[in-house]
Image: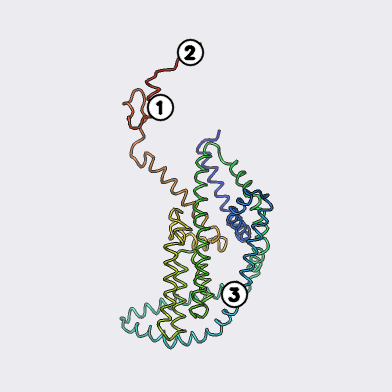
Amino acid sequence: MMRASSQWKFWVWGLVIFVLLFWLLRSMLAPFVVGMAVAYLLDPVADKLEARGWKRWSATTLVLLGFLLAVVLALLLLAPLLQAQITRLIEVAPEWITWAKQEVVPTVQRWLRRLPASEQQQIRAAAGNYAGTAVGWTADVVRNILTSSVAIIDILSVVFITPIVAFYLLRDWDRLVATVDGWLPRPHVDTIREQAREVDTTLAGFVRGQALVCLFLGVFYALGLTIAGLEFGLVIGLITGILSFIPFVGSLVGFSASVGLALFQFDEMWRVGVIMGIFFLGQAIEGNFLTPKLVGDRVGLHPVWVIFALMAGGALAGFVGVLVAVPVASIIGVLTRFCLRQYTQSSFYNGCPPVVATDLDLPPDPLLSHPAAEGAERAGPADTNPAP
């Protein structure tokens, strides 16, 4: 039998090997991670169809084809509009630069003149450093996107391999779960299952719920800003919806971009107020209705923890790291809460080992004794030779 120390070594080395393989293979994992995410998101729908009498392969085919059809239709509908707005954005960019030089820069300079000379130099030096870093980083990203064959291969692999991976994973999802369940160590199987269910609840509540929130906000802001007459309202609205997956970031970016464009585009301040009102209304709907109903308050993922996980995942493993950031954050959060519960029930927290009542100890607390046990105790030992 494997001792406790050997078990710890086995699991630690298994985790180390898994992380090492993930790190080494991270450049080719994107279609598999995306396919697994799609299968996880669509599994409840396939389960419902299967419960109604559909075979698993036919339910998988129908669900996946419907999902791909929706994605393709969305791209076909949005691509011409996005292309027109991006082309227009490139055309008016010089006008924005001129406006910023004539309006924004003098205002900033007047504000700087009110500060002491030492603070002016510090602010200018910091702004120059940050601007240089931002320009260099942007240039590197654009150059890599335009010249890197690896990026093109990644995009093609995601487009063509992801549907295949998603189909097979979705078709065999229940069997895969049952197989992994059969690998669990039997002495701890109930505890591991409980933690796995909590991870699934956390992931389902956050990812599926937050995806619906992002979809609603993207459509709401895109339509609202476009109806209000804001140029590039469609692009800004969709970007705001996508970035809303990161708590507070989407709203902050969308609000800043929309108000800045409105100040440049409109002469009437009431129209700028309309743009601001659209974002205030969207935030009110999200905070009071969408997030409580679709995401809930019991997912166990704090917004700061989500932001940290996404940034850390992107810094460590790029696009694949961003994809796995939320699942890993959910697992770490669940395991952390489990460890804290174990800690608060241990002698390290309580200061003394738990006392077990025996024949030589004090009688047990009557408030903790079970009525059935008391009745059996009063009845005495069972008769080993019952009458015929």
Q: Position of residue 132 (x, y in %)?
A: 48, 77
Q: Is residue 197 above or below residue 2?
A: below
Measuring 58% from the left and 51% from the top, which residue is drawn there? 18
Q: How are the residues colored? A: rainbow
The mark nearer the N terminus, 1 or 3, is: 3
Toward the viewer: 314 or 70? 70
Q: Position of residue 1 (x, y in %)?
A: 56, 33
Measuring 47% from the left and 84% from the top, which residue is drawn there? 265
Toward the viewer: 167 or 142? 167
Callout 1: few (<14), some (14-19), or many (20+) C-alpha neighbours within 10 Å? few
Total numbered circles:
3
Residue 152's quadrant in the figure?
bottom right
> In the visual, does 154 lie left or right of 276?
right
**Amino acid type at image mark 3:** Arg
> In the visual, does 112 lie left or right of 307?
left
Mark 1, residue position: 372
Measuring 39% from the left and 40% from the top, which residue is drawn there? 345
**Amino acid type at image mark 1:** Ala
Q: Are marks 2 and 1 in contact (CB under 8 Å)?
A: no
Q: Position of residue 47 (x, y in %)?
A: 61, 50
Circle 1 — which element?
helix
**Amino acid type at image mark 2:** Pro
Measuring 45% from the left and 56% from the top, which residue is drawn there? 296
Mark 2, residue position: 386
The mark nearer the N terminus, 2 or 3, is: 3
> In the visual, does 310 lie left or right of 152?
left
> In the visual, does 59 lie left or right of 206?
right
Mark 3, residue position: 143
